[in-house]
Image: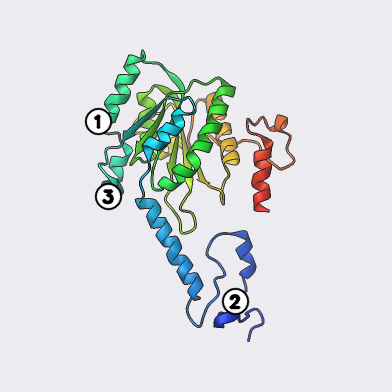
Amino acid sequence: MNRDHRFLSGGVTSDPWDNLKRLTAARVALGRAGTSLPTSAHLEFQLAHAGARDAVHSTLDADRLADQIRAKGLSCFVGNSAAAGRAEYLQRPDLGRTLDEATIKSLSDWHQEEGAPKFDLSIVIADGLSARAVRDHSLPMLANLITLAEKESWSLSPVVIIRQGRVAIGDEIGSQLAARMVVLMIGERPGLSSPDSLGVYFTFEPKSGLRDDSRNCISNIRPEGLSHALASHKLAGLLRGANERRLSGVQLKDDSELVTVDSDIADIGNFLALADIREHYASES
């Protein structure tokens, strides 16, 4: 027998790449039982697949999230995309990119009643393909964005929560509210080990019909991926860069300074507490 393969309990043969398991949550070095996967690995795969399906089909409690946002002293709208329900949303991606007529009217009426103000930043939260990601990660990211806006003296529009929304819907909302910049937080398509991944998309001078290359994206925001602190640090760099260069998308690169455990908070110019960043690195060690 090859000495790189060891028999474990239950007749399971280990994998020579077993040490890679400590570096990734991906399905590597599963071992084998005869010519098949071990029963435990097969059951874990089925559980992960069920978790991904649940994430896609679950619904966001938008009203509860709106109440939590209002408790922070912010105005908040709850609206819908043109997709009538979850089934139509999954089958018709195009409908998730536009607002329904009632939401368009609600935003327009509010904007006119307030004297058609212009805002520096509009924040949109959409359920996307993982309501769980929005539930778990949108509020911490929102808190960091509020801190950044206060530091930069940026005016904030009301936060808009959209059911059955996709990425492009943020640009329509930003345009409706006359916002110079829009940040959209959305649940990403779940992987077999990441049913709770949040994505953040940013557009400078948003308007309907923009292509994907007009937006910047920060992906995989979750405890096992990119922490709230590091994602917010990257987003702050993009927002500041966009203000200086007046653009977003492929022409705007993430040139935020690399944050290390030993960085001085004054040197990196970050609005986050360095303790949060140290905590992230400590959790991965």
Q: Tell me whether circle 1 and circle 3 mark residues in contact (CB < 8 Å).
A: no
Q: Amino acid at mark 1?
A: Glu
What secondary structure is found at the residue carrying circle 3?
helix
Q: CA distance from mark 2 to mark 1?
A: 58 Å
Disc 2 crowd rating (10 Å Cα; few below 14, some 14-19, many 20+) is some
Mark 1 or mark 3: which comes first in sequence?
3
Q: Amino acid at mark 2?
A: Ser
Instruction: Compute the Cα span from label 1 to label 3.
Output: 19 Å
Residue 87 tag number: 3
Which one is nearer the viewer's eye here, 95 or 211? Answer: 95
Which type of secondary structure does the marked residue at label 1 adopt? Answer: helix
Q: Is residue 216 left or right of residue 22?
A: left
- Sequence-first tag of 2 and 1: 2
Q: Position of residue 171 (x, y in %)?
A: 38, 31
| Up-down relation of residue 35 to residue 254 (above or below) | below
Given residues 131 and 226, the one toward you in this image is: 131
- Where residue 49 appears, as percent x and y from the top left, is 42, 61
Mark 1 is surrounded, within 10 Å at the Cα level, by few (under 14), some (14 to 19) or many (20 or more) other residues, namely few
Identify the image quadrant of the N terminus.
bottom right
Q: Residue furthest top?
A: 115
Residue beneath label 1, please? 101
In the picture, the disc for residue 207 is none
Q: CA distance from mark 2 to mark 3?
A: 42 Å
Rendering coords of residue 226 (x, y %)? 57, 46
The image's mark for residue 14 is 2
